[in-house]
C-alpha cells in the first residue's frame, strides 16, 4: 500500500508540470516571431515569459535620396 503523502506529491508535481508546459505551448503557438524564456528556481519552473518581435523590412524604392 502506498502512502497518500507520496501520491499527493506526485499528483501535485504532475499537475504543476502540466500547467507550465501548457503555458509554454500556448505562448509558442500564439507567437509568430520572438522568444519564450523559462526561468527555473531550485529545479522548478517559476516563470514563463514571451517576447514578440515585429520586424519591418525596408523597401529600396522608398529610401530617401
Image (cartoon, rainbow, N blue to C red):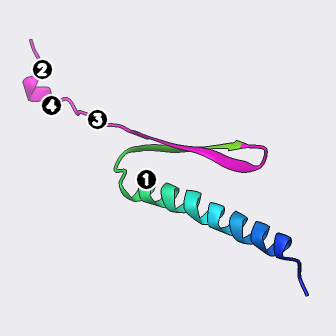
Q: Are marks 4 and 3 in contact (CB under 8 Å)?
A: no
Where does label 2 land, which residue? 63
- What quarter of the picture does the C terminus occupy? top left
Q: Earlier in the sequence, mark 4 or mark 1?
A: 1
Q: Residue at x 83, y 76 (%)?
A: 4
**What segment carries the magenta color?**
41-65
Disc 2 from disc 3: Cα separation: 17 Å
Q: Nearer the viewer, mark 4 or mark 3?
A: 3
Where does label 4 land, which residue? 59
Q: Residue at x 10, y 14 (%)?
A: 64
Where does label 1 land, which residue? 27
Looking at the picture, how far across and down is residue 7, in whole percent?
A: 79, 75
Looking at the picture, how far across and down is residue 35, in whole percent?
A: 47, 43
Q: Secondary structure at mark 2?
A: loop
5 left or right, relative to 36: right
Where does label 3 land, which residue? 55
Q: Are marks 2 and 3 in contact (CB under 8 Å)?
A: no
Q: Is residue 48 magenta?
A: yes
Q: Are marks 2 and 4 in contact (CB under 8 Å)?
A: yes
Q: Nearer the viewer, mark 2 or mark 1?
A: 1
Q: Earlier in the sequence, mark 2 or mark 3?
A: 3
Q: Residues within 10 Å of mark 1 (few under 14, many from 20)?
A: some
Looking at the picture, how far across and down is residue 54, in whole percent?
A: 29, 36
Amino acid at each position: 500500500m502506498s502512502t497518500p503523502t507520496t501520491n499527493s506529491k506526485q499528483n501535485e508535481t504532475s499537475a504543476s508540470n502540466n500547467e507550465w508546459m501548457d503555458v509554454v505551448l500556448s505562448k509558442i503557438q500564439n507567437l509568430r516571431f520572438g522568444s519564450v524564456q523559462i526561468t527555473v528556481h531550485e529545479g522548478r519552473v517559476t516563470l514563463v515569459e514571451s517576447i514578440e518581435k515585429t520586424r519591418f523590412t525596408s523597401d529600396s524604392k522608398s529610401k530617401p535620396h
